[in-house]
Every structure is written in structure tokens, then in C-alpha cells.
Amino acid sequence: MLRLEGLSKRYPTGDEALKGVDLEVPKGQVMALIGPSGAGKSTLIRCINRLVEPTGGRAILDGVDVTALGAGGLRQARRRMGMIFQEYALVERLTVMENVLSGRLGYVSFWRSWFRTYPQSDIDEAFRLLDRVGLTEFCDKRADELSGGQRQRVGIARALIQDPALLLVDEPTASLDPKTSRQIMRLICELCEERDLAAIINIHDVLLAQMFVPRIVGLRVGEVVYDGPADGLSPEVLTEIYGEEDWTATIKKDPDEGNDGDGVEESTEEHMQGLT
Amino acid sequence: MADVAATAAGRRWRKPPLIKNANLRWGLYIGAAVYFILASYSILVEVNWQRVYEGLPRGAKFVGGFFPPFPFANIIETGGFEELAAQRLIDIGDGLIESLTMTVTSTVIGILISVPIGLGAARNIAPMPVYLLCRGIIAISRSFQEVIIAIFFVAMFGFGPFAGMLTLSFATIGFLSKLLAEDIESMDPGQAEAIRATGSRWPQWINYGVQPQVMPRLIGLSLYRLDINFRESSVVGIVGAGGIGSTLLTAFDRYEYSTAATILLIIIGIVFFAEYSSGKIRARLQ
């Protein structure tokens, strides 16, 4: 469904953030992208919806080469790609509902969006999504009144109301505490399964990635150095991705021994089974 | 560990100076001091202290001319209200209304023109040619003081409040567009990026991604500009651009200092009120 062919990005400063990345994500597959800071994870997902303009290669979504589109075509393609951000990137002074509805901007006319007169079907869907992420009663609160986890849920609802085929998720848990991080990761993975959505999730927490995501791609200085199942991450592979370090504590333990024994996440294991 | 502690003990630390080069630093300090002393000296020798002393009673008489302000002076002098005094009150009222009209219309027109120019002058959202054009307009508007623009417009359109209104609108554009553009340039790019990622059109992107971030400041600046415009409306009146300033100038020309005092008190009152209420509203917006 999404195919990257030699996607590369060289910044005007001369830094090569991506060196010809080839990647294929089939429909409905959730994929985690791990790698050290500066490996080009953020650049990669931003090159797919062209928030960052790639300098070479192609990104093909459902047969359409996104990198070749003009302004109008790009807008249409962006509607098919929902994006979730590290710092939530909600418009702080708009209400929760306005933030969610802003996901429909690519579908409604300027004046409808200006007067906030969205079609009833959009509003129904917004309420359904808010209900799904558990924030219905917050719909008229301003986004800056919410906690981190709540904001990220709004961010998720905004991405989903676009009715996307693909989710681009940039460090969804980096600003959250460990428990909220897991809840958010679980929510994202559940929603992808419910809606048969493909997702690329940038994440630097290797354990969290292994816990929820079946396929992992490791990126190092702009190149894919690992692409395989979550349990294929050996110390050698992690050294290949991140460099020399003692990895024993990072490698996921055998599920039979219990996951990590913190007792907070009872459903974690079922989840992994559901996903793998 | 003990070794480290021993060598670290007694080590001195000072905040690094702002100007690193010691010669340059002391040179600047001494140069500024010498310049200040010479400059004050050159002004003070010009003053004839004898004449200043002799002029003091006259100065006191001049200031005394303002008290008591009109119309109290008239009531005290004549024991009643004459036709002339009534006419003067009407003049003051007309001047005030003219000033307030000028203030409000020029602020509204100024805001309407400033918003698009401000958008164009923000480097992070406008393409280079638009940016340069809008920055050019702002630079022109800001390089002239209101009085100079007023003289220009009075020469073009004749005496009266129309010239004043144009002057204040023009000055508002420079002020508001520049500050709005700067606010847009310092906005959070993440929020704007998220709206762009939804596939929004450019105007939708401005409406959702940019406007909510800069709106409180835009409203605050507009209110602030409203009270600047009222103050300026009394200044531009002095060069013939209408309003309370013209009334004030007439009062001085006729040596009617008590009337001038009344006008000054009214201006102070309105400025106080405008400043207080706009401050209140701005505080609530943050």
C-alpha cells in the first residue's frame, strides 16, 4: 500500500538525513521505526507526506507517487495520511472539538471551516471518536486545559477523523509518563486493528516498540539496517542500530516469565498475542 | 576523590564580562563618561542663569493662567454663563467628537489593512517577494513620525479630520503589521505543521494553525493602538489635521489658557480611561 523507493533527503546544509530508503508497508500493518536521535526517523515520516520535501526517490501511496504531486494533489494525498506528533501539536487555543474537526479541513470548503459549520456526518464521527478515546465530556474544553495523555488522545482522534489509510506517528510517547505511554501505544495499535490501518510509528523506546508492534525497522544515519520481527532484536542488531552498549536489560524477556512485573498493564500480553 | 576536592578548593569564579576585550570595555566606559560630561557642560554654559531667575515669576504667571480651568474661571469672574462661554464648550465638544471619530475610524481601517500586510511580512509563512514588499511598506510607514505624515496629508487633502484619519491609519499599519508579523514569526511551528498535515488549504491553514496562536496579541495590540491613536489625534490636530488638537491650538493662539487647561484635562482623562480599560481587557486575554 505504501512503498518507498530510494527515498532520500539532503538538507541545504549538506547533511544527508536519508540515504535512499526502500521500504514497503502493506495495508493494515503497524510498523515501528527505531534508531538513535538524528538517524532520520522524523525526516523519513515527514518526507512521506512532504512536510519535509524529499530530494530524491519516490513515495507511492496506493499507486500514487506522492513526491510527484502538485499542490492540489498533495492536499488530497495528505488527507489519506493521518499524523500524530510528539508534542501533540494541538492548536492550544482551540477547543477539543475544533481540534478534532480540523482533521476534516481537507474535505470541507474554506467558509464551512471558517464558520465551523461542518457537515453533520463529520460532527457525528467526531463525537464517535471522542467517545472511543474517552474524552466526550471534554469536547468544549480548550486543548491547553488537558493533560499530556488527554492531548495525545485528541491528537489521535484528529488523525483518525481524516479517514486515513496510513498513520504517520512521530514519537507519540516521548512526552508522556511510562503508564500513559503504554495506554497511548495500546490505543494506537487497537485503532489500527479496528480500522485496518497501516502505521509507521517512530519511537525510541525499544521495549515499548517490542511490546506492541510486530514489525520493527531500525534506522541508522539515514539507512535501514534492520527490518524484521520484534523478537529478532538481538544485542548484535541493537549494536548495529545504536552502537556499542550493554543491551541485556533492553531485550524483551520471554513472555512466559511475565512481562516486566509492574502489574499495571494486565492486558499487555493479550495484546501482543492479538497483534503478532 | 580527595585529590580532586583538594585541587578544586579555593578556585575563584566570576561572571564573564559582557564585553570580553578589557581595552574595549574600559575604553567604552571612559568614552561614554567623558562624552556625557562635555555634552552637559556645553549645554549648561549656554544658559544665562540670571535670565532664568528673572523669568521665574513670569513662568509662574503663565502656569497660573491655566487655573482655574474653564468654565469655572468664567463662572467665578462673571457669576454666570455667557453665550461666548457656551460657544467655547460646544467647540471643545466638537473637537472631542472629531478626535474620537478619527481615532476609531483610523484604527479600524488600520487593522483591516495591517492584517494582510502582517501575514505577508512574516518570513515563515510568506514567499520572499511578498515578504520584501510587505516589509518595504512597513519600513516606509515607520520611518516617518505622525506629525510629518500629517503635514504631508494636510498639504494633499486640505485642513480637517480627513487628513488626520489618513495619517493615523497609515501610522497604524506600520505599527500593527510589524508586531503582528513578529508574533507570527515566533509562533509554535508544531501546531501549524499539524494543520498543514491534514491537507488543509492555505486560508484554512491560516485560520486554524496561525490565527488562534496570534489572536490574543492582535487584539491586545489593536486596543493599545486605539489609545495611541487618540493621543496622536491631538498631536496631528496641531498641524491642521482636525480634532481636539486644533481646538487646543486655537485656545493657545487666543491666549485662552483656562480653556487650554480644560482641554488638557479632558485629554488626560480620556487617555487614563483608555489605558486602564485596554490594560484590563488585555490582561483578561492572556
Image (cartoon, rainbow, N blue to C red):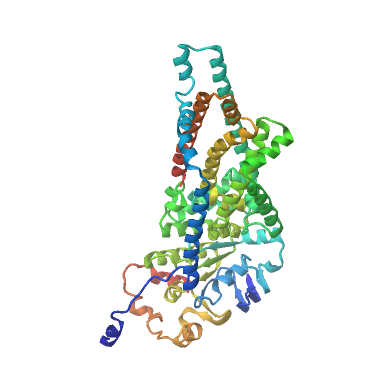
* Res. A61 image quadrant: bottom right
Residue A147 sits above or below residue B156 on the image? below
Who is closer to the viewer here, A126 or A175? Answer: A175
* Residue depicted at x 61% and y 64%: A51
Q: How many marks?
A: 0
Residue appearing at x 54%, y 23% in the figure:
B256
- Residue B149 screen position, x and y as percent: 67, 41
B279 vs A72, left or right, is left
State the image quarter where residue A260 is shown.
bottom left
Residue A25 shows up from this direction: yes
Residue lying furthest left: B2
Judge whether A164 appears above or below B169 on screen. below
Determine the residue positioned at 55% across, 46% down.
B218
Please indicate whether residue A219 sits to the left or right of residue B156 in the image: left
Q: Say above or below: A263 vs B192.
A: below
The picture places residue A53, in percent across and down from the top left corner, at 65, 68
The furthest residue to the front: B50
- The residue closer to the viewer here, B60 or A20, is B60
